[in-house]
Image (cartoon, rainbow, N blue to C red):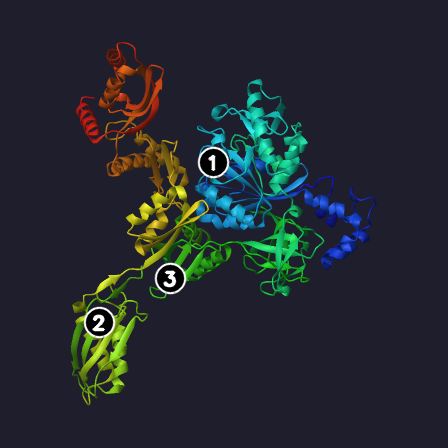
Amino acid sequence: MARFPRPSTPRSLYTLYTSPSKTTPSHSHTHSPTTALLLLRHFSSGSLARAASKDEKEPWWKDSMSRLRNIGISAHIDSGKTTLTERVLYYTGRIHEIHEVRGRDGVGAKMDSMDLEREKGITIQSAATYCTWKDYQVNIIDTPGHVDFTIEVERALRVLDGAILVLCSVGGVQSQSITVDRQMRRYEVPRLAFINKLDRMGADPWKVLNQARSKLRHHSAAMQVPIGLEEDFKGLIDLVQLKALYFHGSSGEKIVAEDIPANMEALVAEKRRELIEAVSEVDDKLAEVFLNDEPVSSTELEEAIRRATVARKFVPVFMGSAFKNKGVQPLLDGVLSYLPCPTEVSSYALDQSKNEEKVTLFGTPDGPLVALAFKLEEGRFGQLTYLRIYEGVIRKGDFIHNINTGKKVKIPRLVRMHSNEMEDIQQAHAGQIVAVFGVDCASGDTFTDGSVKYTMTSMNVPEPVMSLAVQPVSKDSGGQFSKALNRFQREDPTFRVGLDAESGQTIISGMGELHLDIYVERIRREYKVDATVGKPRVNFRETVTQRAEFDYLHKKQTGGQGQYGRVCGYIEPLPQGSSTKFEFDNMIVGQAIPSNFIPAIEKGFKEAANSGSLIGHPVEHLRVVLTDGASHSVDSSELAFKLAAIYAFRQCYTAARPVILEPVMMVELKVPTEFQGTVAGDINKRKGVIVGNDQDGDDSVITAHLCIIFYFVYCRYIEPLPQGSSTKFEFDNMIVGQAIPSNFIPAIEKGFKEAANSGSLIGHPVEHLRVVLTDGASHSVDSSELAFKLAAIYAFRQCYTAARPVILEPVMMVELKVPTEFQGTVAGDINKRKGVIVGNDQDGDDSVITAHVPLNNMFGYSTSLRSMTQGKGEFTMEYKEHSAVSNDVQTQLVNTYRGTKPAE
């Protein structure tokens, strides 16, 4: 396994500990091994005063800490986070080959170590690694982008000093981009933005930059200007150093700096001025230079950007294409230049010995040990606990104290993580992220060396939003099933397991459908337990709506003592708002039924009310009144009266006009204000009642009462749909597991694409279509690519009509310039052609009319316009969009197509 390369100068703290006899360049004299060992003892005792008193010892650890960066890479799903991390690892020499995310080459991206991640092409668990770039050590955590795995982002940002927010140059600021940015604000994490995928069709970095300013409220400016976009994307211009950067070599590893192209000098000057203005608004030193009209040097600008970024007043925006190997190295330089080191970030602990008084942690190795367990994993060698060390030093073999539990534990093994690989180390210092084995703890526990009783504030854990009922197929696998659920609960705070006392079902709750599906599939793969999944049984109730009389005689004679019991009375609904669910009143005057039998009668009615006759659910809000009865001196017994009560209830229940009650949920939704109307309309469709609507920053908080049967569907439905999607066909494989082997998936996609080339209405291509594959089956012998391709084609034809297809026709943006006297005639003709006039301006004596007109109605228009305007009119047109034709036109087109089809 590759070791972390140690920089030649200055040596890190790690180097000093492992080689105490070596000298450090920052010292004016050498230390003997004895001196170095003495220094270790000072650290282990946590004596800050003694270490600080030796001023000559400060530079080496300060310099070591200043060359350390802890960063996370976060974004909306499919923005290129893992691809970017893969390139970072390659350029820093951590890996020697680049592999793509979906693992089509059989390897997959380094940071996606789970088979499920490589199959689905998404990140499910955050993964930690480290690398060196220009003598700096960079610890990186790659986080998931799917909203279902948001806890992974939460706990990563809780322990990081800086972050890179990746934005797609086509998709822009998307729903999860907003969520991730909100999490970064919560934990006060300075960040850079990276606009990725500049090579894609429709890339527009300036649109994305404006979205970041408006939607995320970033005070930001571009650090670079792209040289070309889409297929013409060639390189970047650095606005700080004023150099054009080109990326050569098979993997973009050779950077060539050249002068700025002459045709871009004006744009570069404008964007650099915009950058200086933006930074000078939040940095006084640069503002003074800028306001005095003095030239701003590259060094002054770089220092000002660093001050503003560390203070979280400015977000530098970098650009590039990770997939095309362009712009990654300048982004790494930006991480070193603008993101803080551990000593520049304020961290606080709570002193438990002083009533949770806030204590500032300076992030130095010579303080007492303070470390936070932020993530747990079940590894081959037991529980793997990820630690962020905030202060002090931790060594293999040391005893550390869990402040939350009071336990003292020994560290048997200390490792640094590289995705799923481990490198054993002997010790680590403040600012580093490491993992330990054999330490039993919970996520969020704080460890110290015992000299202090500090605890770190915990992370925000969102509440689960969806539940499913799950049970093992085989009863023999119950032990493994329970073991899996217990493990996943410990690892993931958003994954909850409970037992429904009423139905006896095991209920798992999580952040969404994909979140729970992944865990069910992991149970199958990792524990060899097949489980069935379904919606939780809805806890319906029954109740009565009117009074009903009962008079029932239970009489049974067998050999020996018989059974005799008569009960009379009525049942009725309890008053609305009553806190009790069942009420029993004995209104008998006298001893028609001996008092010792009354409890048995009450017990009988309660048992009967546990299962109503409508759907077998409990009956609530029920009052039973006993008014009369009869007993027998010999045959009456508690059992007889209990049975009499049960049968009496069943006898009169239908006459009381029972109804079914369904649970209604109080639902609170937090959505961006722009989607408020859409979400409110959807709640109304689901028979919900909106009872509150508040504003929280840029979000609307809607409170509604929603029936639970619609709530289950709602959790699955509230997925972000693409707005203004530029793609015409989208294929998503949502199969969890190997119902269809992955090598057949491309054939299925190809089949659907081929089928979409000719719709059944008029034989034209089908556009704006999303195909989602959720399940399937294969045969070990007979399955083939051709078989699955044909299955996809016939499946498309089978369901196409049910999808209510419509015909789209091309609509043109038409601009006409005609003398004003002919304006009315021309406008009337446009309306006849089913056009929509969207603009009307005056240009001297001419009218300029802008309209949207179907292309089919524009044939021969040139002749017609000349005729209407005596040859004085002119027009231009260009394609605008495809839009749906009217019903009569669609019928006419379909009939024409069907009439000509046999002739073909």
Of the image marks 3 and 1, the number of the one nearer the N terminus: 1
Dot 2 surroundings within 10 Å: few (below 14), some, or many (20 or more)?
Answer: many
Where residue 122 appears, as percent x and y from the top left, is 46, 42
Q: Which mark is residue 211?
A: 1
Q: Which residue is mark 3?
A: 475
Please tell me whether mark 2 or mark 3 is closer to you in this view.
2
Inspect the image, locate mark 1, and give the three-letter code of the amino acid beneath it: Gln
Between 858 and 253, the residue placed more toward the observer is: 858
Of the image marks 2 and 3, the number of the one nearer the N terminus: 3
Of the image marks 2 and 1, the number of the one nearer the N terminus: 1
Where residue 552 appears, as percent x and y from the top left, is 16, 78
Q: Quadrant of residue 866?
A: top left
Q: Which mark is residue 572?
A: 2
Q: Is residue 126 visible?
A: no
Where residue 337 appears, as percent x and y from the top left, is 64, 37
- Position of residue 875 relative to residue 696, above or below, is above
Tell me: 4 left or right of 514: right
Q: Quick one: which residue is furthest to the bottom in this view? A: 633
Inspect the image, locate mark 3, and give the three-letter code of the amino acid beneath it: Lys
Q: Are marks 2 and 3 in contact (CB under 8 Å)?
A: no
Inspect the image, locate mark 2, and give the three-letter code of the amino acid beneath it: Glu
Where residue 342 appears, as percent x and y from the top left, is 65, 47
Q: Quick one: which residue is furthest to the right in this view? A: 29
Q: Quadrant of residue 667?
A: bottom left
Between 820 and 851, the residue placed more toward the observer is: 820
Q: Is residue 451 visible?
A: yes
At numbered mark 2, what does the secondary structure look like: helix, strand or loop? strand
At numbered mark 3, what does the secondary structure look like: helix, strand or loop? helix
Dot 1 surroundings within 10 Å: few (below 14), some, or many (20 or more)?
Answer: some
- Position of residue 200 relative to residue 677, above or below, is above
Residue at image coords 24%, 11% = 867
Dot 3 surroundings within 10 Å: few (below 14), some, or many (20 or more)?
Answer: few
